[in-house]
Image (spheres, helix red, strand yellow):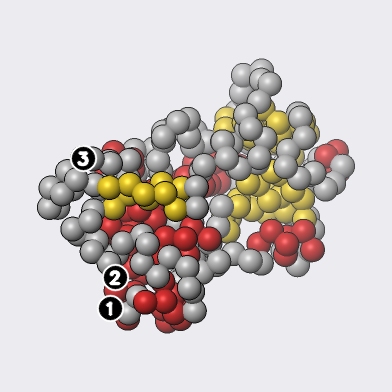
Amino acid sequence: MPELPEVEVTRRSFAAAIAGGRILSVETGKPLRWPLGIDAQRLQGRRVMGVRRRGKYLLLDLDEGMLLLHLGMSGSLGFAQTLPARGVHDHFELFTTHGVLRLHDPRRFGAVVYAGSEQDAVAIKLLSGLGMEPLSDGFSLERFKAGLKAARAPVKQVLLAGKLVVGVGNIYASEVLFMAGIRPTTSAMHIGPKRAQRLYDAIRQVLHAAVDAGGSTLRDFSSADGQTGHFQLQARVYAREGMPCHTCTTPVRMLRQGQRSSFYCPKCQRA
């Protein structure tokens, strides 16, 4: 599943190129997770003012309204002056004077939704429950510490939930907890101020590194200009079960938490 680094990499790969482009037409394929919410032809003539990100949503600001895009489990965007003929898994195409933006999504868990503004009910429903943005100045250490203290769940589950901080997906949660020296099963409420500081710093460091590496390509992720990610090659524990820890040589272990695999070093992450 594309996580925050992959979505941010995708945004950066086409945001400047599409900005200022006027929509010529919109073509849709099979239905996605949610309906577009507007007659596609009504988007014709509107101009793309810019592309922002909120959590794992891409927000295409138009001169009238906005489009909220989500890549779902297996989606990816492509953007170019011209693209090959639409395939069976291409479900949304935005033709603009600057190029074509296409959503490719084999599993159709992605979405493209129109909202008049961020105050519209649909935008509020999709965005209001999201936690702090870890790569922004709004990522507050004090709020982060308070959120951990208020949570009874294991810290790995708290990170994945996205209500305290967004974008720390499964790969990145394992890497963040390793860097902070915290075991995935540790109760979030039992993490003291010093370890909370280490965890906060690790979140920022790992996610910045992932964005710089182009995200992680485990199956078929690529940015809108066709580039694959390489962060998975830097992983210290993720998907390294039985292999020696890069720090202490202890074999990395794997456990299951809520249907997800967690990787950790039992020596470097004692509690």
Up/down of 253 relative to 122, above or below: above
The residue that label 3 is drawn on is 243
Q: Can the viewer see residue 99 in this picture? A: no
Q: Position of residue 244 (x, y in %)?
A: 17, 43
The answer to whether the residue labelled 1 contacts the one labelled 2, judged by CB atoms less than 8 Å apart, is yes
Q: What amino acid is at disc 2? A: Arg
The first of marks 3 and 2 along the sequence is 2
Q: Nearest the camera: 189 or 53?
A: 189
Residue 127 pos. (x, y %)? 66, 62
Q: Nearer the viewer, residue 159 or 141?
A: 159
Considering the image in quadrants, where does the C terminus appear?
bottom left
Residue wearing tag 1:
194
Q: Secondary structure at mark 3?
A: loop
Q: Is residue 195 visible?
A: yes
The picture places residue 16, in percent across and down from the top left corner, at: 54, 46
> Quick one: SS at disc 2?
helix
Q: Please state the horizontal and vertical placement of residue 250, each as a whole percent of the image.
A: 15, 49
Query: What is the spatial separation of the Cα atoms under label 3 and label 1, in whole angstroms?
Result: 29 Å
Distance from the alpha carbon under mark 1 to that under mark 2: 6 Å
Identify the mark at residue 271; answer none if there is no mark.
none
| Image side of residue 10 versus residue 214, left or right | right
Element under label 1? Answer: helix
Amino acid type of disc 1?
Lys
- First of labels 3, 1 by sequence position: 1
Which residue is rendered at x = 33% and y = 47% of the image?
254
Which one is closest to the eye, mark 3 or mark 1? 3
Q: Is residue 98 left or right of residue 45?
A: left
Q: Closer to us: mark 3 or mark 2? A: 3
Report the label total: 3
Residue at screen point 55% across, 66% down = 163
